[in-house]
Structure formats: C-alpha cells, structure tokens
C-alpha cells in the first residue's frame, strides 16, 4: 500500500538550556536554543513551515510530492545544504511570485507566472529569498529513478539543466492534476500516483536532460508473456489497488521501464487500459442486466457512481443511463 502521509509541519520548540553563572554563557545558550527552535520550524525543503498556509506531502519511495502555499507578503528565506537526495522540480500554480536565487557568487531575480517551473539538483547548496506569496507543487525525484530510467532507455545522462522561472505548460498541467491528487488525501489511487510520478520524471529527462554523447534511445516493448501477466494482474484487483511496482516485479522489470514498455505495447498507460476494461465490463452489465448504476459502478471497480458516470461519459461519449436506453434496456 502506498505510504500516503499528510504532513502539516508544525513547529516544535522545547529546547532546554541550563542557566549559566556568566552572561556570555547564558547568551550563548540562549542563541543555541533559539537556533534549535528555528531549525525545528524548517521543513525538508528549507521552508519555514510556520509560515505555510498549505503544506501537504506524499511519499512513494522513488518520488516525493509536495504542495506548499502561503498568501503572505513577507520575504521567506530558504537555505539548504547539498545532499544526495536527487532532483527537485517546482511548478507555480499561480502568477505573482518572485524569488532571488544566489548562485555562482551572485544574485539573480526570477518571476514566476502560472506554469512557471524551476529545476535544481539537490546535490548543490541552495540559497534563495522567496518574495511574496506563492503556491507550488514540488516533485522530488530520487537519483536511483533517474539512473535506472536512463539505463533502461539505453541513454547516458550528462546532466540535468538548472532552470528558474521557465514556462512549461506540460508540467503545469501535470502539477494541477497532482494538486488535486494531494487534496484527495487517502482517496488517491496508488496506480495513478505512481504513473504520474513516472510521467513527470520522464518529461524532466526528455526536456531538461542533456544526454551523454554517443547514446541513443532504444525501443522498449513487453513480451507477449509479460503483457498477458500485467493485464491479468490489473484485472484481478477490482478496486485498482495493485501497484505498478508489484506488476513490474512480476514481469522482472523496474517500475519506470514497465510503464514505458506497457504504453509502447498497448498505446495506453496501465491506468488508461484498466479504465477502458472497466467501461467494457460496465457496458455488458448495462446491456444484459437490470442492476442499478451504483451497483454496476461498484461491480466494475469504480470508486462510486459519480466516478463511473464521469469516466463512462468521457470514454463512450454519453452517460451510462442514456447508453442503456439506447441499447434497449
């Protein structure tokens, strides 16, 4: 089961200090306690969590997704030491944010509109001033994901370009979907969330990755046995709670490789393919039974009747009740 956690990072103080008999020792102890309290208020991305109005996090292992929002007009400093965590993508959900970034011994200012992004390597030290309110979806990709993805594509990676304030409508659209997914909390489909992470990561490598010289991208497809096994596992879990990792493991593939190979083989993502099969099953029940729409929705693995109606209408072009009447039931 996907490790879904809603992180409202509350500041925790409580550093205790022993009162010293000298003024200098007392001042030093007080400064230390104050520094500890300040550090406690910083989240894993260097933000002061006490200033965040919206703070959510979803961790899948290879990916971490965040939603961070504040409406204040204050300047928020962010300082992070470099680490081996991976790469961070930030996508602005609204216009009006500005940040100053310190890099290579100088400050640069960047304006963020809706769908503006920044990409940075978490191995690098980061120092910035966030000017005014902001609303960002952030995606953290592990180095293991990037390395495995490049290896499976037969493509070496020289580096990932660092950008700030760059418009990217594709990431903007994916970030809007991700924001809704984070707001859904425990109702988020693990299958969908994993695919969303792989899609974002693949776009990052395609758009901002600089391939090493002499490398190319090979075609990847599932074998007939792998395709049959994957489809069987998808259909076996009526509520769609099977994870990509489970299916990929059964096919002896990594998660990211499996998703790309499944799409290349079927022209669908696993999630899209599963929705189409559920709609096919629903049409049979609509045509051959008098069961209610809510019963059919549950029998076919939809979360509720509303989800069933919305998906059916998108794929078939008409609501299920109208389709049933046209079919003569």
Image (spheres, rainbow, N blue to C red):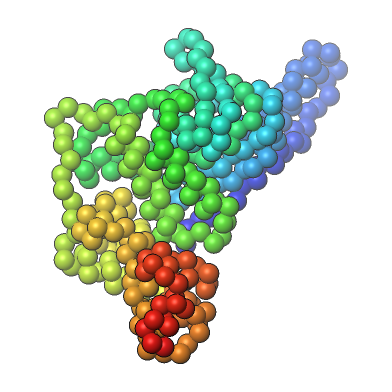
Q: Position of residue 181 (x, y in %)?
A: 52, 53
- Where is residue 156 shown, x and y percent of the image? 22, 34
Left or right: 322 as drawn, with respect to 210:
right
232 or 299, which is in the foreground? 299
Point out residue 72 in the picture as x, y percentages from the top left corner: 70, 31
Residue 19's image quarter? Answer: top right
Q: Residue at x 33, y 31 (%)?
A: 208
Write down the quadrant of residue 270 in the picture: bottom left
Identify the residue at horizontal 30%, vertical 31% (top origin).
209
Which residue is situated farthest in the top direction here? 105
Which is nearer the eye, 186 or 134?
A: 134
**Above or below: residue 13 compared with residue 230:** above
Please, is residue 276 above or below residue 215 in the view?
A: below
Is 253 rendered above or below residue 132? below
* Near-viewer residue (31 or 236): 236
Relative to residue 150, is residue 326 depicted above or below? Answer: below
Say which quarter of the image contains residue 259.
bottom left
Query: Which residue is at a point 60% across and 24% down the rendered structure image?
Result: 130
């Amino acid at each position: 089961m996907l490790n879904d956690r809603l992180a409202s990072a509350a500041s925790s103080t409580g550093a205790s200090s022993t009162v010293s008999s000298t003024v200098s020792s007392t001042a030093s102890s007080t400064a230390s306690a104050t520094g500890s309290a300040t550090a406690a208020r910083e989240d894993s991305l260097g933000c002061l969590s006490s200033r965040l109005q919206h703070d959510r996090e979803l961790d899948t292992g290879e990916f971490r997704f965040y939603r961070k929002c504040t409406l204040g007009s204050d300047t928020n400093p962010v300082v992070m030491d470099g680490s081996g965590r991976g790469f961070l993508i930030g996508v602005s959900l609204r216009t009006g944010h500005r940040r100053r970034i310190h890099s290579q011994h100088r400050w640069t200012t960047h304006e963020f509109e809706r769908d503006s992004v920044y990409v940075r390597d978490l191995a690098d030290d980061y120092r910035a001033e966030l000017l005014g309110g902001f609303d960002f979806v952030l995606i953290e990709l592990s180095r293991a994901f990037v390395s495995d993805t490049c290896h499976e594509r037969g493509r070496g990676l020289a580096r990932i370009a660092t950008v700030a304030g760059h418009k990217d409508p594709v990431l903007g659209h994916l970030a809007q979907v991700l924001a809704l997914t984070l707001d859904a909390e425990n109702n988020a489909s693990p299958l969908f969330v994993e695919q969303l992470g792989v899609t974002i990561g693949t776009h990052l490598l395609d758009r901002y990755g600089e391939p090493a010289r002499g490398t190319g991208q090979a075609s990847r497809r599932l074998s007939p046995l792998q395709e049959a096994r994957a489809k069987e596992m998808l259909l076996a879990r009526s509520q769609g709670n099977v994870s990509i990792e489970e299916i990929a493991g059964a096919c002896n593939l990594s998660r990211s490789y499996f998703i790309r190979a499944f799409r290349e083989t079927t022209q669908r993502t696993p999630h899209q393919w599963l929705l189409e099969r559920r709609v096919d099953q629903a049409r049979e029940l609509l045509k051959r039974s008098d069961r209610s729409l809510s019963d059919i929705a549950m029998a076919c693995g939809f979360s509720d009747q509303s989800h069933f109606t919305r998906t059916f209408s998108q794929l078939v072009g008409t609501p299920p009740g109208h389709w049933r009447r046209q079919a003569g039931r």
